[in-house]
Amino acid sequence: MSSFTFVAPFALHRCREMLQARHEPATLFAFKGQTRLAVSIAPVDPDTYRFKLRKMQKSLLSRPMGSFITASGVLQKRDDFTTFVKSDIRISTFSAALQIFLTCLIVGFFGVLIALDNPAYQTSIAAGTMGVIALLIVWLWAYIRIETQYLLKVLEAALNDAGYMQPSALVSISSFGD
């Protein structure tokens, strides 16, 4: 999980508007695999909003699937000109583990089928199958890192003057995997 807090140099209502402007509406038709950024913001009280960012399928006709990585957080009024932003990037451990398990199951199944047809090559097929599984796990780890960085950059660009976090405004950051 990755989390950070900082002070945005904008009023609360302006931060809410800038974050909501990042929302991409679903379209009727889209190519398979096209994604959009879904942003939801809900008031908690007059001085606080909760937000959630998530990549989703772009088409209304596709299944409502999204990434298993979600950024959620709070916008809290600090004064009339600044807003305190706290966000956590959450990874659904169940979804990631299920994806790894199903991938290993499929690759292992085909490895067993090939090994049954070629008994002389069983050792090399088993090693190759394990190598493919290891590569797929590394790919999933890289995907999680890329998606996490994407959501962090969306938040930074939406809620900071000039589109990046200014070191003087930064309160704390803890990186993924800590």
Image: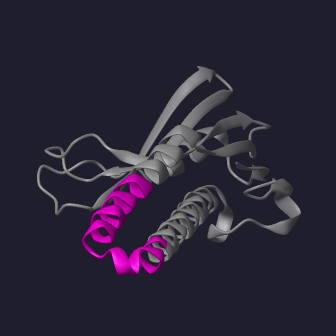
Let me know if residue 152 is in the magenta part: no
Q: Main secondary structure of the magenta part?
A: helix
Query: Is 75 displayed left or right of 124 in the figure?
Result: right
Most extreme residue toward the front, as rendered?
120
Image height of 127 relative to 23, above or below: below
Q: Position of residue 113 (x, y in %)?
A: 28, 63
**The C terminus - image quarter:** bottom right
Q: Do we see residue 100 in this rendering?
A: yes
Note whether residue 69 is visible. Answer: no
Disc tally is 0
Considering only vertical position in the picture, is 140 above or below 84? below
Give the residue displayed 74% in from the left and 39% down from the top. Answer: 80
Please give the name of the residue rendered at 39% of the width and 80% of the height, measured from the top-left corner. Answer: 121
Extreme residue in the top direction: 45
At x 88%, y 64%, the residue is: 168
Residue 22, relative to residue 41: is it above or below?
below
Question: Is 156 positioned to the left or the right of 51 in the image?
Answer: right
Residue 40 location, x and y as percent? 46, 37
Where does the image place residue 16, in percent across and percent down from the top left? 55, 42
Identify the residue at image location x=48%, y=66%: 133
Please give the range of residues in magenta: 103-126
> How is the protein colored in the picture?
one colour
Residue closer to the observer: 130 or 60: 130
The answer to whether residue 125 is magenta is yes
| Near-viewer residue (146 or 129) | 129
The front one of 16 and 146 is 146
Residue 10 rendering spot, x and y as whole percentages? 68, 50
